[in-house]
Image: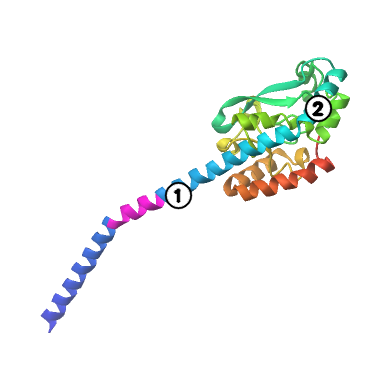
Amino acid sequence: MTSLSGHARSHRIQEIERLMQMRKKKNPWKMQLKISIWEWTVAFAKFLKTTFDILGSFILLIFFSPLFLVTAILIYITDPGPVFYVANRVGLNGAHFGFIKFRSMYVNAEQRKEQLLTQNESEDGVIFKMKNDPRITPVGRFLRRFSIDELPQLINVLKGDMSLVGPRPPLPEEVQQYTLQQRKRLHVKPGITCLWQIKGRSEIPFQQQVQLDLQYIRSQGIFKDLIILLKTIPAVITGKGAY
């Protein structure tokens, strides 16, 4: 009886080991299938976002073309010089690109910046913000209040440098001061609008801006982009936090 019981136990152990071996052999296929599904999902989501960005920016450029013309004329009348301001910004994975805006400052604004660094109102010191910046033209102040100066970035979106929604693109000198955590903002394309743009814009401290950007990156999607874009409209109209 004992021998039979021992034999049965030994057979059961062998059967368990056999089943475990079979499972091990099957697991690589299951794992590969899961990886393939995940890669396909990511690729499809990226395709949807890219398509949405291209179509959206193209339609908006046509829609706002009369406003582009009027803005260009007003900028030149106020302070003769280039209508557009192209700055070097940092985009996806640290790549640099030409960031296009309507010029809202006087032509010599960059030279005057050094004289104003001690008046930086940004709590974190990484970015430069000044509510009553004397370098901004009267027309430029209006453009900034309603974010009209940002409209040329639709060209950046059409070119593929930016997205409609994503973290705002930083300056190279700002990125040099980033921590490893803050550099995670560069894991996606920068955007024209983002979470902190609809929650207070420049009034939000830099570290909180980073947290909101990382929150967006973790949960980004087409529907979330649509919601942010829709919420950007009242944020622009009220002009809260814009300077």
Q: Using the rendered image of the protein, determine whether residue 180 is visible from the camera's viewpoint.
A: no
Secondary structure at numbered mark 2 = helix
Q: Amino acid at mark 2?
A: Gln
Quarter of the image where one finds residue 25: bottom left
Q: Which residue is mark 2?
A: 119
Residue 155 location (% of width, % of height): 66, 29
Residue 142 location (% of width, % of height): 86, 31
Where does the magenta region start and end? Answer: 26-35
Nearer to us in this view, 104 or 71 = 71
Identify the image quadrant of the N terminus. bottom left
The disc, 2 or 1, on the residue closer to the chain's N-terminal end is 1
Q: Which residue is mark 1?
A: 38
Compared across the picture, whether 73 is left or right of 229 comes to right
Is 158 above or below relative to 235?
above
Compared across the picture, whether 193 is left or right of 188 comes to right
Q: Was residue 19 drawn as part of the magenta stretch in this picture?
A: no
